[in-house]
């Protein structure tokens, strides 16, 4: 009896386990490596429940409407609006097969709850086949036949093309997308070649138009456009795959992506010469800023590119030719310095003094040498010509003191040509951002750093107080709960890290616009407290690696709640 009981139990457990594996395992081999795009919706019922739990914390009414709309949209995408015969507890996959000359073909792999009802809902235009507990269907009979053949050759499925990192990311997403870029580039090769020619012609035409405008130095503008356009096209040519995945939870929305390129390609070499960093200094910036941003990479290449662009802004005169030569000599010396990461944050102040208050750190060694070179460069900068702008630069070394260090003061007053700004929009924006005194910039040079504070009343002392504060001080960002939570959602090491208080920025901008019309702002401190709006940051990080560029984006539920409260208040006031 004991033997039979044990044997029966083992048999039942084994049978149950095999049943679960069979039910959960999607026949992904049906989507071959010929697919240009693959989409997967993980367990639709559970995913939509997670979305509902998230959005119900924002607004119950919107949550219900959103859930119904998502279900309808997905159903229509499957050509089955009512989900007849579909098992919503298991994954749905779609393969998209591209063709340069005709519309793409779609192949669906949908879990079956009732095969007859599902086939009836699809109608006669679809060709289908049952595979275990799944229905594979397509309008294209050839795609269905190809899928059936692919099932016998799993080594040729789209999954065989994914790197281990891409597989992990694709599997983690509640909604995941894979682009076989190598295949797509091959299919649309002719179109890419034409696009490259069109970019060259567009830049040539733009050069002719801008160069005919009096007083305009078009070289730096065209150089920027050319670098961006040609760099983007080169990245597409070098690309191998792109994977992205959404994750939904009660705490927020996550989005990860992975862009992979061919080994030793031009883009791969660019990625590998821009190593990511940790950005530890960011936590010592002043607390409660509207945004915190940090960047790192191949600083020498960035300086060379930036300074070359700046050198092109000198007018074509003999006097400026001499100034340009001096400028480039200083640039050579700057390139010999050692550069690290770059940090930036901003807040918005009062309209009367200019609203932009920005704080930056550039890691530079030796920083005293950088100060000497900056002093040499400033008198030359007056020779720079900007299209449609006349500017006056006033540089005062040792103008102030902060934290026991001398602070240099630069004020740039810009006059916009009325012909290029007939409605005086640019003129007004400059006044709003920087105030009537012009663009005011303060610089200090502690060991290993260059500190800059931009804004008429922005305080270098406030910046230094935060940077020199004890680790547990309430003055600094790292002891702000919203900052800590947002920073934890970004990559540990990155090339770009951004934490942005979207709702806070919108509220401040709306208050500033109201102030410019001499009206009370819609978001007084009392209203903000009553609405329960607190600091909350959207997180974005970008990281380069060997043959790859990855990003992470996270929107916490507090960001969504704040956004809805801001929208609701504005709607009521209107």
Image (cartoon, rainbow, N blue to C red):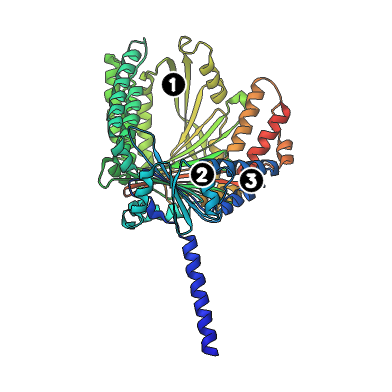
Residue drawn at 52 percent across, 56 percent down = 90
Locate the C terminus and report the quarter of the image it occupies: top right
Residue at the disc numbered 1: 393
Is 292 left or right of 56, judged from the image as shown?
A: left
Q: Nearer the viewer, mark 2 or mark 3?
A: 2
In front here: 129 or 498?
A: 129
Residues at marks 2 and 1, CA–CA distance in whole angstroms = 70 Å
In front here: 428 or 226?
A: 226
Q: Is residue 397 above or below residue 10?
A: above
Residues at marks 3 and 1, CA–CA distance in whole angstroms = 51 Å
Residue at the disc numbered 3: 55
* Residue 360 location (% of width, % of height): 47, 38
Label 3 CA crowd tier, 10 Å (few <14, some 14–19, many 20+):
many
The image quadrant that residue 305 belongs to is top left
In front here: 346 or 70?
A: 70
* Residue 347 location (% of width, % of height): 57, 35
For label 2, the SS is helix
Residues tagged 3 and 1 counted as in contact (Cβ below 8 A) = no
Residue at the disc numbered 2: 122
Mark 3 / mark 1, whichever is N-terminal: 3
Residue 11 shows in the view: yes
Is 121 left or right of 29, judged from the image as shown?
A: right
Residues tagged 2 and 1 counted as in contact (Cβ below 8 A) = no
* Residue 178 location (% of width, % of height): 40, 46
Q: Is residue 571 above or below residue 266?
A: above
Q: Nearer the viewer, mark 3 or mark 1?
A: 3
Q: Is residue 79 above or below residue 50?
A: above
């Amino acid at each position: 009896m004991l033997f039979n009981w044990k044997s029966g139990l083992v048999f039942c457990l084994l049978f149950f386990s095999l049943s679960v594996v069979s039910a959960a395992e999607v026949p992904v081999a049906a989507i071959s490596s010929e697919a240009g795009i693959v989409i997967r919706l993980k367990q639709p019922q559970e995913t939509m429940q997670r979305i509902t739990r998230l959005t119900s914390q924002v607004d119950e009414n919107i949550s219900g409407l959103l859930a119904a709309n998502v279900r309808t949209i997905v159903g229509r995408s499957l050509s089955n609006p009512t989900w007849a015969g579909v098992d919503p507890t298991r994954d749905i996959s779609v393969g998209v097969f591209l063709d340069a000359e005709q519309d793409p073909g779609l192949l669906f792999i949908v879990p079956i709850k009732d095969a007859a009802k599902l086939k009836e809902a699809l109608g006669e235009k679809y060709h289908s086949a049952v595979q275990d507990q799944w229905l594979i269907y397509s309008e294209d009979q050839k795609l269905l036949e190809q899928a059936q053949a692919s099932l016998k050759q799993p080594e040729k499925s789209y999954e065989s093309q994914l790197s281990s990192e891409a597989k992990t990311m694709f599997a983690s997403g509640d909604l995941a997308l894979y682009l076989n870029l190598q295949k797509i580039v091959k299919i649309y090769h002719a179109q890419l070649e034409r696009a490259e020619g069109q970019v060259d012609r567009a830049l040539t035409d733009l050069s002719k138009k801008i160069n005919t405008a009096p007083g305009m130095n078009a070289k730096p503008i065209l150089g920027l456009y050319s670098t961006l356009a040609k760099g983007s096209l080169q990245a597409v040519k070098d690309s191998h795959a792109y994977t992205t995945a959404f994750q939904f939870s009660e705490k927020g929305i996550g989005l990860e992506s992975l862009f992979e390129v061919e080994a030793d390609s031009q883009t791969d070499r660019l990625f590998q010469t821009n190593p990511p960093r940790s950005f530890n200094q960011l936590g010592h910036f002043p607390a409660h800023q509207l945004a915190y941003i940090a960047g790192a990479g191949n600083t020498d290449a960035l300086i060379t590119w930036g300074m070359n662009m700046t050198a092109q802004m000198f007018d074509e005169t003999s006097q400026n030719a001499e100034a340009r030569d001096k400028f480039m000599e200083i640039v050579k010396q700057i390139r010999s310095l050692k550069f690290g990461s770059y940090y930036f944050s901003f807040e918005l102040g009062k309209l009367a003094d200019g609203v932009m208050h920005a704080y930056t750190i550039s890691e530079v060694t030796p920083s005293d040498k950088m100060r000497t070179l900056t002093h040499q460069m400033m008198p030359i900068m007056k020779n720079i010509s900007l299209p449609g702008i006349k500017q006056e630069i006033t540089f005062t070394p040792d103008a102030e003191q902060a934290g026991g260090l001398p602070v240099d003061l630069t004020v740039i007053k810009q006059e916009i040509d009325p012909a290029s700004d007939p409605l005086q929009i640019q003129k007004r924006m400059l006044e709003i951002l920087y105030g009537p005194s012009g663009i005011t910039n303060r610089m200090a040079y502690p060991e290993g750093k260059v500190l800059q504070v931009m804004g008429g009343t922005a305080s270098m002392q406030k910046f230094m107080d935060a940077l020199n504060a004890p680790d547990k001080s309430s003055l600094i960002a790292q002891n702000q709960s919203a900052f800590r939570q947002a920073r934890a959602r970004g990559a540990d090491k990155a090339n770009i890290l951004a934490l942005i208080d979207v709702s806070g920025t919108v509220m401040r901008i709306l208050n500033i616009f109201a102030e410019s019309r001499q009206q009370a702002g819609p978001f007084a401190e009392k209203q903000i407290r009553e609405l329960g709006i607190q600091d909350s940051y959207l997180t974005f990080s970008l990281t380069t690696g060997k043959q790859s560029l990855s990003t992470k984006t996270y929107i916490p539920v507090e960001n969504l709640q704040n956004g809805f409260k801001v929208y609701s208040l504005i709607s009521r006031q209107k």
